[in-house]
Image (cartoon, rainbow, N blue to C red):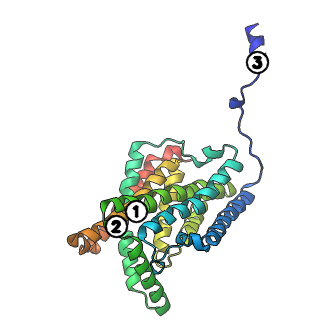
Amino acid sequence: MAKLLKTELPLDDSDQPVKPLFTFGPGMRAMLLVALVFSCVGIYEMISKAQQLSWLSPSPENGDTPQTAWIAAIIRSIFIFGVPALIYANVFPQDRFGYFRLNVPVSGMKILIGAFLMIFLLPAINQGVTWVNNAITNQELRTFEDEMAKLDAWFIQMPTFGGFLFCLLANALVPAICEELLFRAGIQQILMERTRFKHVSIIATAMIFAFFHLDPISVPFIFLAGLILGYAFYWTGSLRITIVMHFLFNGISIFIEYMNQHSEAFKNYNVGMGIFVISIIGSAGFMFLLWKSSQKEIL
């Protein structure tokens, strides 16, 4: 009787798998996600051209402040990267928000390894950018980079510690979350569903990641950072670690700039070849440790 009653009980809706609203293959879903991104870019650009909302594309020539630019950066990150990822995850994949793999736990040891990896990587990347920048001979590219440097100097002004914390939120934490949702949890996973060659998916995602940063000098270095984040996501299966690593990479850069603005000794410090070599070796070592500690979890 008990067994009969059990079979007659209605199934709880919460036990049923969530069905997608539409069913498309990985290729079609990849194009749809790209369409969502470029649609959001177009909408953002169109809105920012309205006179009342011109501060969404801030400029010192317009009298905008860095704080205004940081608010615009938060909105831009959420709208261009976060919104397409959220729409995509809520409509197409069967497990919806679970598709982001934010619910996949990752050990504290792996997070620590990932943190040290990004800490060691940053000096090498900063020095590499400096070397490439100093080697520019093309006058048009030189002029473009000089203008970008002036804009960055205005954008990153942090006269107070409160300004540093606000800058950290706007230019490190929010972009880390939104960009990882789109690039690693979205684009990289779609490409991995599309091809048997997982490394190609990671490389392609890193290339797209570098392209979206729109800085020709930094492209190879952003590509390298994208590769590291891509493999960290692939090896651990969790977006938590890549968000932490991405945040640390951005956050330490902002902290260095804050110290440059408030300490002459820090500002005049030169990385040098020795620190560069240690940075390369250390980051490669921690990359190996992350791979080694994650071997049993690779899908």
Q: Amino acid at mark 1?
A: Cys
Labelled disc at residue 167: 1
**Residue 76 placement (x, y as % from top left):** 55, 64
Identity of the residue drawn at 51% across and 66% down: 72
Q: How far is mark 3 from mark 1, CA to CA?
A: 55 Å
The image quarter containing residue 9 is: top right
Most extreme residue toward the left, as rendered?
265
Q: Could you tell me which secondary element the residue under label 2 belongs to?
A: loop
Does 17 sit above or below residue 163? above
Identity of the residue drawn at 48% across and 57% down: 174
Determine whether label 1 and label 2 are within 8 Å by CB.
yes
Q: Amino acid at mark 2?
A: Met
Say whether disc 3 or disc 2 marks the residue closer to the N-terminus: 3
Identity of the residue drawn at 38% across and 51% down: 113
Quarter placement of the N terminus: top right
Q: How far is mark 3 from mark 2, CA to CA?
A: 63 Å
Residue picked out by circle 2: 158
Labelled disc at residue 9: 3
Characterize the local packing of mark 1: few (<14), some (14-19) or many (20 or more) Cα atoms within 10 angstroms: many
